[in-house]
Amino acid sequence: MLETEDTPEMRNTIASALLAATALAAPARAEVLDTMGPILSTAADAATLNTKCDSYVSAIEQRKAALEAETGAATIDGTLTRYDELTALLGAGSGEFTLYQQVMADQARRDAGASCQVRLATIASEISLSRPIYDRLKAIDAGGADEPTKWYLSRTLSGFERSGVALDVANRARVQELNEQLAELGTQFENNIANGRQVIKVRPEELTGLPADFIAAHKPGDDGLIEISTDTPDYQPVMTYAESDDLRRRLSEVYNQRAYPANDAILRQMFTLRQELATILGRPNYATLVLEDKMVDSPARVQQLLTDMAAAARPAAMRDYDKNLEVLRELRPGAERIEFWQTGWLSPKVQQKYYAYNPQEARQYFAYDNVRDGILKLTEDLFGVDIRPWDTPVWDPEVEAYEMVDGDRVIGRFYFDSHPRPGKYTHANMIPLRPGADGEPPVAALVMNLPDGGHDTGLMEHSQVTTFLHEFGHMIHGMFGGHTRWFGQSGVATEWDFVEAPSQMLENWVYDYDTLAQFAVNKDGQVIPRDLVERMNKARYFNLGLGDMTQLGYSNISLQFHQSAVPDDLGAATRQWRDQYAIVPAPDWVQFQDAFGHLNGYSAIYYTYRWSKVIADDLFTRFEREGLRNPQAAADYRRLVLEPGGTKPAAELVRDFLGRDVSLDAYRAEMAKDQ
Ligand SMILES: [Zn+2]
């Protein structure tokens, strides 16, 4: 879909970035692992969850107090190790309770997950403002230390400085207040979106064009009308298949007013408080503050990136637009332009006309169980590891658990919670649960909402296979990168705007015939035809330009709200910033800002997805050249990009793998592919 943002898959990124792990002195390390304990199973009630949260909080507070009271020489083996343990606990607790909030079967336990995260965020803020801890870390002489340790210490210290640790007592107190208020506002903002479901009533004949199983599942009520909601299972098929422009326009209107106007008021406060925070910290605006530790490290550089990407994407978007318009004119003679509510509906029609590709034709080959086994097999083949079932308690009977083995060593453990359940989080994301370090394997979960043979056909769209592989890309980053000396550099703890690169790069394999032929088999045992995969590949680049221009528009919204005065009319400003890039303009009723969940978690840095895409395209050039299943390229990728985790700047990881700096050329080439 062009008009929806990427899902927030990396929920725990901040916590991960804080995380640390190390050559811990054995007793201290045992205590850390003991506090974390196992992930709670389905038998744990809300009270048990709260008790577990208490044990995290008290262990963290104890360690915080001990570190603040520490005397004597500040050392890497002592002070930094204890700081690393402290943040490891914070990260593990935060990941674990994010999981409970997303997957538990009842509201009481999901609420326990949410409230523990607020408690941990409060302590995280207090630690980031602790002058005594900062002073101890600053006193460490890292002169003789290895490079990763020096990098870790310097990133940690500058993180403290950006948090405001050097401010006077009154200002530090105000920063703590602001952090807590912002966390609270963020929760309200996301709750309003989660509860923002809207319903419209439609006449049965308006469902013309929708698949028979959709129509069968939507019976008219006593008034003869059918209810259609803004939830994805309704919204997406209607916007794609309904022939009625009027129906799509009406649904789009309520969809684009979810959480409106309630979230306008919250956003206003959020932007105002963020600006106050930036001002106290001596920065001109909040965007400047959050960008300082990123690869693209200033608002001007982000703006330049958006401009450069748009220069490549705009011509492709115009070609997409023309193809769409031509098909529209066949269907709606005399049409002068494409309307906002027509883009999703036109896309499959263009794919059919120009590329003879129909996504429904591919679906029969993507049964969930086969896809899952295929992804695990691909990982084994590429990276020379074994993946086997892991016998461990789980929080729901349908959750699957695995361990990854390299030689005779377990190097990671993970869960797949793959299918929808009532009350469960509705997007897809990877949650780091235990940071790995020095022999202690990392643990993580993929929470997704894929079809399930037990409850439906179990057949996945090709786009869902892509999502699965994308999330698994985060997972292998966490697993292979989870063996650093410090917990705080484990796995995905790189610069935030690099994190979506390994995941987006792995998406390429779902277009590879040799890979698909190993698992894409229909119920009659027939392997996906080569000719279908070829057509899929031809259709692949259509609408990329149009989609990317819209994504650049969203990136612009995210940036502008955090470097400009709060606009009088948030909706009007949002539409204007979006349409500086997006080709199909947003109508006046679009209030996208109020349901743009990333404005909470990502604030000014939604561009992360686009920048990571540039890197992913560039990393992939080596596989394109040397072969997607070339063992040397895969081994180098594992060793040079994934295994280092956050032990060095991400720009160096790219340089180590490609032998040169990251470049926009591969992105430009991709945008030129569909002619
Ligand atoms: Zn992702």
Image (spheres, rainbow, N blue to C red):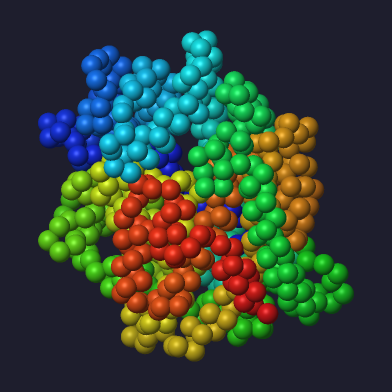
Q: From this viewpoint, is residue 418 visible?
A: no
Q: Position of residue 58 (x, y in %)?
A: 27, 22
Q: Residue at x 37, y 24 (%)?
A: 138
Q: Residue at x 31, y 26 (%)?
A: 140
575 to 655, vertically: above or below: above
Q: Position of residue 245 (x, y in %)?
A: 75, 65
Q: Residue at x 50, y 29 (%)?
A: 162
> In which quadrant of the rendered view does residue 4 lie?
bottom right
Point out the image quarter for the N terminus: bottom right
Q: Nearer the viewer, residue 492 or 6?
A: 492
Point out the image quarter for the C terminus: bottom right
Give the left or right position of residue 522, taking residue 79 as reference. right
Q: Nearer the viewer, residue 353 or 457?
A: 353
648 to 238, vertically: above or below: above
Give the left or right position of residue 101, taking residue 217 as reference. left
Q: Nearer the viewer, residue 468 or 329?
A: 468
Q: From this viewpoint, is residue 536 visible?
A: yes
Q: Position of residue 97 (x, y in %)?
A: 34, 37
